[in-house]
Image (cartoon, coloured by chain):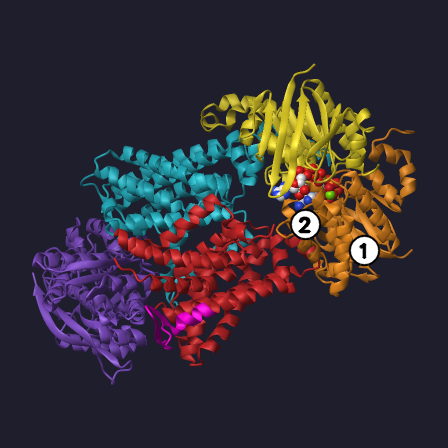
Chain colours: A red, B orange, C yellow, D cyan, E purple
Amino acid sequence: MDVNWAQVLVNSLVTGSLYLIASVGLTLTYGLSGFPNFAYAEYISLGGFVGYFVADELGAGLPAAFIVAFLVVGVVGFLCYRGIFQPMARRGATIIHLMVASIALGLILRHLIPVFGDFIPALGWSWAPSYFTITWVAFDFGPVRLTGLWLWTIFTAVALSVVLHFLLTRTRIGKAIRATSSNPDLALASGIDVEKVIWITWFLGAGLAAVAGIFRGAETQVWPMTGWEMILPVFAVVMLGGIGNFYGAIAAAFIIGLAENIGVVALTALGLSTSYRIGIAFLILIITLIVKPQGLAMFFRRS
Amino acid sequence: MKPILAAENVNAGYGDVIIIHDVSVEVASGEIAAIVGPNGSGKSTLIKSILGFAKLFRGSILYQNKDITGIASHRAVNLGIGYVPQTDNVFPNLTIIENLDMGAYNKKGKDSIKTGKGDILQMFPELAARKNALAENLSGGERQMLAIARAMMAKPKVLLLDEPLASLSPKPSAVIESKLEQIRDAGIAILIVEQNVKKALELSNRGYVLVNGALAMEGESASLLADDSFKERFLGLEQGH
Amino acid sequence: MAETLLRVENVCKHFGGIYAVDGVNMNIREGGIWGLVGPNGSGKSTLFNTILGLQHPNSGGIYFKGQRTNNMAPHQIYDLGVVNGFQIPRLFPSLTVLDNMLVAARGQQGDGFFNSLFLREKWQKQEELLTDEALDILELIELRKHIFSTAGELSGGQRKLLEIARALMAHPTLLLLDEPAAGINPVLGKKVFQKLQDLSCSGMTFFIVEHRLEILFEFASWIYVMDKGKTVAEGNPEDIVKEAAFYQAYLGKE
Amino acid sequence: MDPSMYLLDLVVFIGIFGIMSLSLNLEFGFTGLANFGKVVFFLIGAYSYALLSQAGFPFYLCLIIGALIAAVFGFLISLPALRLRTDYLAIVILTSGEIIRLIVKTEDWIAGGDWGTSVAPAIALPGASAHAGILVNIGLVYVCLFICFTISRLLTNSPYGRVMRAIREDEVAAEALGKDRAKYKAQILMLGSAMAGLAGGLYVQYLHYVLPGMFLPIVTFTVWIMVLLGGPANCWGALLGAALVEVFDRGANLAKDLLTLPTDASNLQYILFGVLILLVLLYRPQGLLKESAVKTRATERVRSLGGAVRNKED
Amino acid sequence: GAPSSETVKIGCLLDTTGDLGPMGGRILNGARLAVDEINAAGGVLGKQVELVEEDGKTDPGAGFDRVKKMVEIDGVQVITGPMITGASLLAIPYVKGRQVPLISPSATGIQLSNEDGTEWFFRTCLRDDAQGMVLADLIAEKGYTKLATIVLDNTYGKGLEQAIVDELEVKGWSGEQVASIHYAEGTKDYRSELQKIKDAGADVVVCVSYCDDGIIIFKQALDLGLDEVAWMGCDGNYGSGLFKDAKSAEFMEKAFVAGTRTVGTGPQNDHFVAAYTEKYGEAPEVYCDTMYDAVWAAAKAIQAAGTYDGDAIRVALTGIQFDGATGPITFNDIGDRSSGAFEIWEVVLDPSTETGYKNAPVKVITWST
Ligand SMILES: Nc1ncnc2c1ncn2[C@@H]1O[C@H](COP(=O)(O)OP(=O)(O)OP(=O)(O)O)[C@@H](O)[C@H]1O
Ligand SMILES: Nc1ncnc2c1ncn2[C@@H]1O[C@H](COP(=O)(O)OP(=O)(O)OP(=O)(O)O)[C@@H](O)[C@H]1O
Ligand SMILES: [Mg+2]
Ligand SMILES: [Mg+2]
């Protein structure tokens, strides 16, 4: 049967770009604080909601939506860390405790969104989805179709990679992030203000989640489960790339994007339900981890 | 001589257990002070409490005549107090070079950092040979060298060293000993905890003996070394040996 | 002459381009304390790890009592009687000191799934004997009063001591110790070595890496010197100090 | 209307989830295996029970075989568990769980797919009152719970239990001390999974129906909360946690009828539940009951003696 | 037994949180509207009606628990709901034992009629086979020969797809099904699935979705140029909610040949739509009307039974007859609607509406057993 492979590849690129934007913040905070933050899903949703409020309810446009959502959700991320995870970590909480706490926090944030909507109807937040009104034109490039939003998603992913690369390797804060994730006590003993480094990273990470939330929201819809719907593939990306490894995440995002989309072609060819598309991403992850528990990180490590 | 760093009447410990009881130690610029004592007597706890890594229940820390009790650890470090912990003293997922860079995290001046790094690599050829290796793959002794080198990168005014010579073979150990003497002579204060009691006292000007969290003896290193009861209790040497 | 216990034959272990262990030969016979010295990074810990099955050598052979152990899992090597104490202690931090000791005890009947459920009377009796033994050892290393503290609460040196004590609980035929005296007070360190010597008289064999030569040379009967992954000299303590290779490699003197 | 029915129903649920909580406690509390896919084994036990009982097996065989099949899956999960770090393992099992649920949901031929299939009760009493039905279930569930509890207690207070904890703390060190961690992990995951499978069988025979939708990840999460709340590495804690969470779940729902709320009660229930978990984790991270030390005759003897030794020296 | 109290309770189990939360919230409005009207008209048995609202969380286990709670703690003798098939399947044996009838507004699966205890399970929506028949007729009538389906991977999606395919076979349709996509709830990226349909060369696509995932499928379909193929919808993707997104609206106008839905035609329907729109500021979406009817049916049955007792209410339900928002409501002896009407709808431009689009009826097909 004919398959328009070019389009499948483009679709993969778009999926991968979105996963990349969504997973960078998670991998950085995961590496730094040493636990998987499931409430990250809610940062994505919240980003979508704030973005929707700014862009649509206030009518301030997408650029403003990105900035406000980045800041607001960034602050939420910071507060979550400061108010919950930091005190827990100080009391010697294990990775499992932190992980379960993050699931609980996610539960709280997810259900707070509609509660906010109940108290402040002007926000327009509820369980019922909201839709961005901005529409995007579609272009044809030969056999391939692309919309403006898809191009923006790809562009943002690339730009983000470049900026973060410089941030991590060339700036003091970047180095401090890496030192802190390696040995926090010793980072303190080297005169690094570890707390500040962690705060900044949590702020940044949550802010990036918000950006992903807006992209996802603009492509689909925003509702309280927006983040949860994509958190498992995002975790797959983070782990496949090697936790805390930003370069690994770039590669993994596109691998998972590709696997999901090619998976759809393969599944339908086999007469199976495309529900399994997420399963394919995970099969790749599980096999990689069993063969190489470090994920792709092994390729992105200087020796 | 006026002490640059003094810990006065320190009561310190973990959680709500007090391990150090009313201990005072001090060190002046240009001298090496040693803390020795049996295992579990609280030497590491004492040093940690100076920088806030262990809980300080009572007592005060004076640095350059200023009270810095309760100051955030990283700020104390930035004031000029360098610290090498007894365990976990390198960044395992950073390379040797990056570890050294971290030591100079708050130093200004690219060139002086560069020469500092060069000097240190020259001092430890073992490290220079593997400067892009991850610290987690180093041998026990190589880690120890790296830990000390990292602390030196910051060019501190006071150095707190928790068993720097453990795990070192004679050659690097000698290098470090002479380096310590050298920086002492340059006017740096050094407080050292060491289980190699004899060596520590030979190296230092003054010694403190900590037993069960309290000071049991203190005095000139040479006189401690000459003290028969000290020799018997802490060096395991028979009297008159 | 006593029988050969451990034979290391041309063992190599590489990490990428690093030749951590590069053709080592050794022959350790039953009884006594055997020393291994060498500058930092010369491959001593790596050699130990290969003997213990924690890392597998790239080439060469390791034989314990004639049996090749190259590709055995650590627990199988333990079953043969080879036990070690890590250079950086690896205790079970939230277990009590006593439990740390009892985990290591050899030949426990109660540590099998069905036995623990159905042979309770049997292992309870055995465990009382083991507990007495553990308490004796802890007494020696001055940890008796800490038996119900968790291992995570011990000081650096106490952990090291417990690491050694725990290994003794395993009734090793051959005990590998990586720098047992590092971080340990000299008085206590000597006491520990004294104990090891007593045990070696009753047939146990010790193979010890140690930088504190004044202690090691007092007790060891044979010394191997390693440098850059190779054995460069061997001999008894009195002779080895006269060897040029030893001086050059280890002390850095001509 | 009969509130006692609802109460008895609660008692059954506490029993079933008590078994789940005990089994996770063995895996995580004692052995440190972060099984974030508890629901899979629950599912496997449930579906095995359903299919076997449709094939005409008597209920006790359905329960036992279901537990054994779950144990086999537990063994399979123990293979990656050997290589993966806690958090990696957690996420791998979590997602494998979702994949397995996806399979039973999508593949209609297994057991009706999303439609599920009905399950005969273990002990049918034709013509008996609804009360009698529940009481029979309470009997059955609590016999199983008692067996699981006894096994947990005996196992963890023995040298075997000590090895479990040693593996939790440092598996390489345990291996170097002669403990075959592969064997131990496999045994514990098999035992834990068998218990979860047993609970699954009890669950569906009680509800008379099995559906993929009954096995959402939230079940796993709930069991985790039970263990963390009650106190990991404490068998009584696991039971306490199960009881508290079940009571909270229903209690909060009943409480909402007594209050007038300015917003949707359902959202508030989730938020309240989340806040409670956070409070426990923050202020009582060791759980309500703290880890019980290994208790054997020998250690108990030393303990009674050891106290004296200490006092003398201090 | 009938508890004596000042109000008559009608249970209401909808999923207002979780995957179906958005839909459940809207359906709940339909129930509340009905209760308001019933009370304004004097209530039943001389008492006011109290709606006991519980959230099933889109989780069958939780839904079942809420059924038990309503029955045992609140003493409810009739429950409107559950919304989802799963919770219905779990609850049916229980309510049979406890003698409390259920009236579901939205569980359309055929299999529910075969369950033991189905006589306790009523529904105001029409079953999949009825709708499948109408859609199959349409496909055959318009002469399409290459059918692609993109359906939710749940009982609703697969049930309706199966009904259509079965019916086409009965009809002896000569075409073939070239693609069958079952997507999981919560998938929000359908590009490659849609591309697959495009590559398969389908000439008609049947989409079985709910409103909220429908919007996304349609807008991505527009992005991929699938508006050149004919599309058919169902009750799940009927409603002005789908026009909230401009692209989705544009697509539906361009590509939709037709869809079907349960419909009422009489004045009761006009009244319902007007009252609902006035009260909630938006037009009713799918199943709001069936829920409204379910609550009315419960009230009327209690009144007819003359006593607040589950068994009596069940008997009364089987004999009930009234004009609801979705047409004449009567139940057969297994609790399914014995008659109903399907509307075939399409999407047309209408500048007078807020979004510029609206659903327009093409024709109404009445149906009865
Ligand atoms: N996993 C590894 N990857 C890369 N290099 C390694 C690894 N492990 C050890 N090495 C290197 O191999 C060499 C030998 O290390 P080893 O730990 O055996 O030394 P050692 O003789 O025990 O030294 P020390 O006395 O300092 O403990 C060192 O240079 C070390 O950096
Ligand atoms: N984190 C901790 N929590 C509780 N108690 C601790 C902790 N760390 C150390 N201790 C206890 O404090 C006492 C002193 O420990 P410290 O590490 O200061 O000893 P030390 O003098 O440095 O010994 P060593 O020479 O063995 O390193 C010990 O009895 C130890 O058990
Ligand atoms: Mg110490
Ligand atoms: Mg070593």
Label 1 CA crowd tier, 10 Å (few <14, some 14–19, many 20+): many
| Highlighted range, magenta | A129-155
Q: Which mark is residue C20?
A: none
Q: Is residue A285 above or below residue C232?
A: below
User: In the picture, which quadrant includes the C terminus of chain E?
Assistant: bottom left
Work out how far the residue at label 2 is from the one at label 1, CA to CA, in angstroms: 19 Å
Amino acid marked by disc 2? Val
Secondary element at tag 1: strand
Amino acid marked by disc 1? Val
Q: Horizontally, is E164 left or right of D12 in the view?
A: left
Q: Horizontally, is D174 left or right of E295 in the view?
A: right
Image depth: mark 2 or mark 1 in front: 2
Secondary element at tag 2: loop
Task: Answer whether residue A257 is magenta in the image.
Answer: no
Q: Is residue A115 above or below residue A28?
A: below
Residue C252, x across and y down, in percent = 81, 39
Query: Dividing the picture into quarters, in which one does residue A59 lie?
Result: bottom left
The chain letter under disc 2 is: B
Q: Horizontally, is A51 left or right of C91 in the view?
A: left
Q: Which residue is mark 2?
A: B90
One can see residue A171 in this view: yes
Looking at the image, is mark 2 or mark 1 earlier in the sequence? Answer: 2
One can see residue E73 in this view: no
Residue C20, x across and y down, in percent = 65, 38
Residue E21, x across and y down, in percent = 33, 64
